[in-house]
């Protein structure tokens, strides 16, 4: 693999008051890989996601996605580049139906501009049709079709997590960042989700970076692992190699671990 | 942003460009931002007043500008000190144009109003910080207090001191009663911010028009001395005003000490900082909340009597004071009692100073413009500490 | 001391008018408040931004129309679109810095803006004629009104109330607005607004420029407020600062929550209920003075608002699932 990485971060730093949540994190993500980001609780993984997707402004450091600088850009611009993230605490749009949650995420909908709505009232309807079909297809994958017309607020925790994933996929990302996607989902659906990730990678070349605490999932489904602790990247490599890395074991044993490495 | 990377309907709007420019400006070095800010402020002051008419004045103006910017640079992370420097800049220019005497005289005029704002703001900020309640009925607590004093002082013809005590007591009871029947139960149901805010507006209507129902809309006066003045150092201040200033400041200092020294005060501030944390750390929050209402409403009652004493009573007395009181709360940093106290007094004085430049009818508008500007530059207030999320 | 009743058609004494005149006037106020609160619905019910400065936008719309017509001698019909543009400009000026603020700060900032506008209108006498207000901007309207009246008389209704044409036009505009807003709300644009209302960060993570949508929402609400401002000015035949007190915005919120959030047609229902109840109280034979009755009406408004927020925060006709208050 000599291809340029799809994403590179260099020396990202962020402090909150006196706490340095991310302290010079540097990493590459290979194009077309499924990369796991692991680390003990409070390692700064979620904060790192927030920093590279524009939700927080880094104090220092640079991040590039597919050749473009992303640090300092607002989240919606980064998302339009094709770098889409989900949230650890789900953000279902509760008072909107599931189908609207999905359709919202579709890119290139001219009907989202007021000008088109007022002056070209027909221009967006065809796109809306396509988007609706895609949405139903994706809901099918996650067993949510029968809930399409329910308000998202009525869904269970696991269903919301799935909805958020499906919604992120609707945005047609080239690089998908998932913050603990399996948490709260039943194992069968978890499997389907993982299979779907594999398929998207194979068919559309989507790259994944996912935060995960379940080591079995990490070992079996990722092809690279990056380990963070105390705001830094302390190790990276093949899953098996990382697992036996001295620094990683120390970090998990030293930190207030979430169960550590099984 | 590279062209062609965005889909249709996703081109940047004017608003985005502007927002981007603002962001870029916010990343400029502090000296540049301070310089531009102070330049604009001084420009407004000069244009609103008059052009300097001698070389000496020009030189002095430039010196004030330069000194202000120089003084601000080492204070980059200290908003309260920065605000003091900006204020000094304004005072210096006003003195340059209008003389020390005029500026001091208006400053004294502003103190009584400042004391009223501060008394109102301390309670409002505690309630806001602790209960997350944007209490639009707080102004009407002031009105309520004023009319309670009127009842004792004018209807029953007793001395105003009794009226004052009665007002503080009844308004405090009103506050506690409302907590029991309204705010407590609503909090229990997890009511949202707008829901509580609209409820407070409803309550404001009930109190204000309840007062109008009983006393009508005509202007009423408390039985106070409106003519005597006290003179010192060539400055004059009305006797009633002076009493308001003295009693007001003593109360404010006592409140400040209570909040800083006593266990109850510390708990109030802890709750206002973080209600959930205080709850988990084992403070009996519902008791502290009751005391907070007692204080907030009692001080509002006192402020209302003062406002009635130096002006006249009418059912909108307190509502007309509410927005400047909110301004003091925001300037001081929501939930920060010391901030509200200081900001209230300063705001009263600054508003009075503004009458050196603008029509007196616009002095409140000046207060609102200050509020909006501070909200834009520093939404967490001058005395608040920056909080993420 | 301002008379809070200035917003009510109290100037009409009951005996001097037949019932139909009285209710026509009430109907116009209900229509004006419907339009006024439609802007609030767009902001609060569909975008989640708590605009408390709507009375300020109404003032800017009414004043710019009146100043352009009566003082600058501009054609009345031309002054309307221009006053809309001016109001939109103010919407942007207010929104650009303040829409980044937290919801409660935004509410305070907008009410402060509206009060600043009112105080300026009161004091900038050269421009606004201060508390005396501006008259004589409505000649063009009067001629239109007469044509409509003649038309109705031709249809066979001979004793048309003088204000009936304004009633028709006000409700015509209100219905048109409710219809178009409902339509636009159903488009992808409206969907993004609702997403912003639900969770701004989620919308941003999906590539939506939440800030720009909030700004658009505020600017449109401002222009809707301006239309309500014209109609109020025409109804009263003058423009004075007192008509734009914060209480106008508060009553707009009462209309909004009465009719229910996230429903444009509900706004009209809310306005009609509120005005029927308020004016219906006049017919109660109460042995108390006019001021007391007036006070009583507002006490009832306050109690209704408290009761709604306590027991039915989604409003009388709001959908519980789309309830945007609470939680
Ligand atoms: N907005 C914030 N303000 C203050 N501190 C924060 C903020 N966000 C994160 N932190 C702190 O930064 C550190 C890193 O938190 P982060 O949520 O990034 O960890 P994490 O690796 O995602 O942990 P977990 O596995 O539990 O999700 C923590 O100490 C946290 O308290
Ligand atoms: Mg996390």
Image: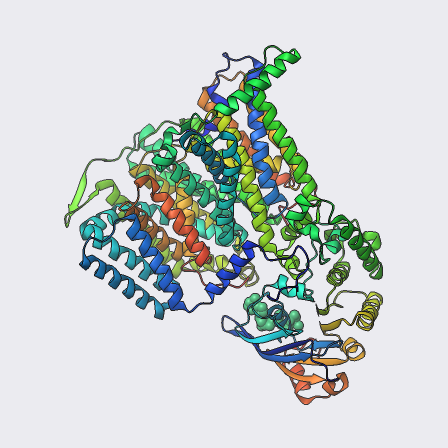
Residue in the picture at 54% in, 41% down: C222
Q: Position of residue A163 (x, y in %)?
A: 76, 59
Would you place residue C118 above or below residue A134 in this image?
A: above
Give the position of the N terminus of chain B as an image quadrant: bottom right
| Quarter assignment of residue A189 | bottom right
Q: How many circles with numbers are drawn on the protein?
A: 0
User: Relative to residue C231, is residue B2 drawn left or right?
Assistant: right
Q: Position of residue C275 (x, y in %)?
A: 57, 26
Nearer-the-camera pick, B252 or C327: C327
Give the position of the C terminus of chain B as an image quadrant: bottom right
- The answer to whether residue B163 shows anywhere in this view is yes
Residue in the picture at 73% in, 48% down: A123
Nearer-the-camera pick, A49 or B5: B5
Would you place residue B7 above or below residue C161 in this image?
A: below
User: Relative to residue C18, is residue B97 drawn left or right?
Assistant: left
| Quarter assignment of residue A91 | bottom right
| Quarter assignment of residue B6 | bottom right
Nearer-the-camera pick, B234 or C112: C112
User: Relative to residue B203, is residue A140 drawn left or right?
Assistant: right
Nearer-the-camera pick, A10 or C147: C147
Q: Position of residue C310 (x, y in %)?
A: 61, 40
Residue in the picture at 57% in, 42% down: C221
Ligand 2: quadrant of the figure = bottom right
């Amino acid at each position: 693999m000599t291809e340029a990485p799809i994403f590179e971060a260099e020396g990202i730093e962020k402090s909150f008051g006196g706490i340095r949540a991310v302290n010079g994190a540097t990493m590459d993500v290979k194009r077309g890989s499924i990369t796991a980001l692991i680390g003990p609780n409070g390692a700064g993984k979620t904060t790192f996601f927030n920093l590279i997707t524009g939700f927080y402004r880094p104090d220092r450091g640079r991040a590039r996605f597919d050749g473009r600088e992303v640090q300092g850009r607002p989240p919606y611009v980064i998302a339009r580049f094709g770098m889409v993230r989900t949230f650890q605490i789900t953000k279902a749009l509760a008072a909107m139906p599931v189908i609207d949650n999905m359709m919202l995420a579709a890119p290139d909908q001219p009907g989202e501009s007021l000008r088109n709505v007022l002056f070209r009232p027909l221009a967006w309807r065809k796109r809306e049709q396509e988007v609706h079909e895609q949405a139903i297809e994706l809901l099918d994958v996650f067993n949510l079709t029968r809930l399409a017309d329910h308000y998202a607020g009525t869904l269970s925790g696991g269903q919301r997590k799935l909805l958020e994933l499906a919604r992120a996929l609707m945005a047609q990302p080239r690089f998908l960042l998932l913050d603990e996607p399996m948490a709260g989902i039943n194992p069968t659906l978890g499997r389907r989700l993982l299979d779907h990730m594999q398929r998207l990678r194979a068919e559309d070349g989507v790259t994944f970076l996912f935060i995960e605490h379940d080591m079995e999932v990490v070992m079996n489904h990722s092809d690279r692992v990056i380990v963070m602790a105390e705001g830094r990247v302390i190790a990276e490599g093949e899953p098996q190699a990382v697992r036996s890395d001295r620094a990683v074991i120390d970090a998990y044993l030293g930190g207030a671990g979430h169960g550590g490495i099984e | 942003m590279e062209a062609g990377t965005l889909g249709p309907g996703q081109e940047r709007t004017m608003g985005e460009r502007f927002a981007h420019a603002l962001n870029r400006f916010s990343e400029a070095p502090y000296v540049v931002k301070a310089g531009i800010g102070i330049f604009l402020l001084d420009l407004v002051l000069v244009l609103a007043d008059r052009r300097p008419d001698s070389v000496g004045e020009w030189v002095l103006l430039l010196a004030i500008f330069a000194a202000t910017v120089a003084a601000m640079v080492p204070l980059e992370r200290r908003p309260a000190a920065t605000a003091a420097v900006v204020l000094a800049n304004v005072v210096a220019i006003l003195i340059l144009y209008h003389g020390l005497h005029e500026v001091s005289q208006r400053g004294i005029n502003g103190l009584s109003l400042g004391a009223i704002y501060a008394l109102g703001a301390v309670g409002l900020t505690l309630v806001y910080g602790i209960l997350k309640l944007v209490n639009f009925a707080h102004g009407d607590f002031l009105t309520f207090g004023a009319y309670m004093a009127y009842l004792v002082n004018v209807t029953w013809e007793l001395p105003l001191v009794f009226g004052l005590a009665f007002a503080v007591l009844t308004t405090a009871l009103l506050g506690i009663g409302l907590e029991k029947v309204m705010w407590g139960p609503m909090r229990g149901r997890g009511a949202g911010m707008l829901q509580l805010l609209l409820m407070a507006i409803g309550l404001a209507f009930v109190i204000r028009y309840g007062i109008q129902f009983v006393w009508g809309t005509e202007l009423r006066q408390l039985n106070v001395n409106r003519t005597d003045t006290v003179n010192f150092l060539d400055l004059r201040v009305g006797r009633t005003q002076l009493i308001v200033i003295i009693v007001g400041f003593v109360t404010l200092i006592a409140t400040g000490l209570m909040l800083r020294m006593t266990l109850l005060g510390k708990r109030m501030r802890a709750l206002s900082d973080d209600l959930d944390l205080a709850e988990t750390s084992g403070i009996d929050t519902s008791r502290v909340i009751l005391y907070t209402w007692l204080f907030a409403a009692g001080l509002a009652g006192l402020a209302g009597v003062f406002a009635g004493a130096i002006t006249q009573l009418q059912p909108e007395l307190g509502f007309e004071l509410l927005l400047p009181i909110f301004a003091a709360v925001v300037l001081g940093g929501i939930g920060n009692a010391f901030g509200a106290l200081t900001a209230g007094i300063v705001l009263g004085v600054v508003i009075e100073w503004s009458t050196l430049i603008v029509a007196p009818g616009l002095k409140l508008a000046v207060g609102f413009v200050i509020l909006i500007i501070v909200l834009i530059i520093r939404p967490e207030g001058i005395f608040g500490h920056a909080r993420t999320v | 001391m301002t008379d809070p009743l200035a917003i009510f058609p109290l100037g009409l004494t009951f005996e001097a008018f037949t019932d139909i005149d009285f209710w026509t006037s009430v109907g116009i106020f209900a229509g004006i408040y419907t339009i006024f609160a439609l802007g609030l619905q767009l902001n609060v019910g569909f975008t989640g931004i708590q605009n408390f400065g709507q009375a300020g936008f109404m003032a800017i719309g009414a004043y710019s129309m009146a100043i352009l017509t009566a003082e600058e001698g501009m054609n009345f019909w031309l002054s309307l679109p221009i006053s809309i543009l001016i109001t939109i400009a103010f919407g942007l000026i207010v929104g650009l810095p303040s829409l980044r603020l937290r919801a409660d700060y935004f509410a305070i900032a907008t009410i402060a803006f509206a009060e600043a506008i009112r105080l300026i209108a009161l004091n900038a006498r050269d421009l606004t004629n201060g508390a005396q207000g501006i008259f004589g901007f409505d000649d063009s309207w009067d001629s239109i009104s007469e044509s409509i009246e003649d038309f109705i008389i031709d249809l066979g209704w001979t004793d048309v109330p003088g204000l009936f044409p304004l009633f028709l036009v006000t409700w015509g505009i209100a219905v048109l607005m409710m219809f178009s807003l409902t339509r636009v709300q159903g488009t992808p644009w409206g969907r993004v607004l609702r997403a912003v209302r639900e969770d701004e960060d989620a919308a941003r993570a999906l590539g939506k420029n939440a800030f720009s949508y909030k700004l658009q929402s505020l600017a449109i609400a401002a222009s809707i407020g301006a239309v309500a401002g014209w109609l109020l000015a025409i109804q009263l035949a003058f423009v004075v600062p007192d008509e734009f007190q914060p209480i106008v915005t508060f009553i707009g919120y009462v209309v909004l929550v009465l009719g229910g959030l996230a429903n444009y047609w509900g706004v009209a229902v809310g306005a009609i209920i509120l005005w029927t109840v308020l004016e219906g109280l006049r017919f109660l034979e109460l042995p108390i003075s006019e001021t007391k009755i007036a006070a009583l009406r507002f006490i009832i408004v306050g109690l209704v608002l408290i009761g709604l927020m306590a027991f039915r925060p989604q409003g009388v006709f709001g959908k519980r699932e789309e309830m945007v208050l609470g939680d």
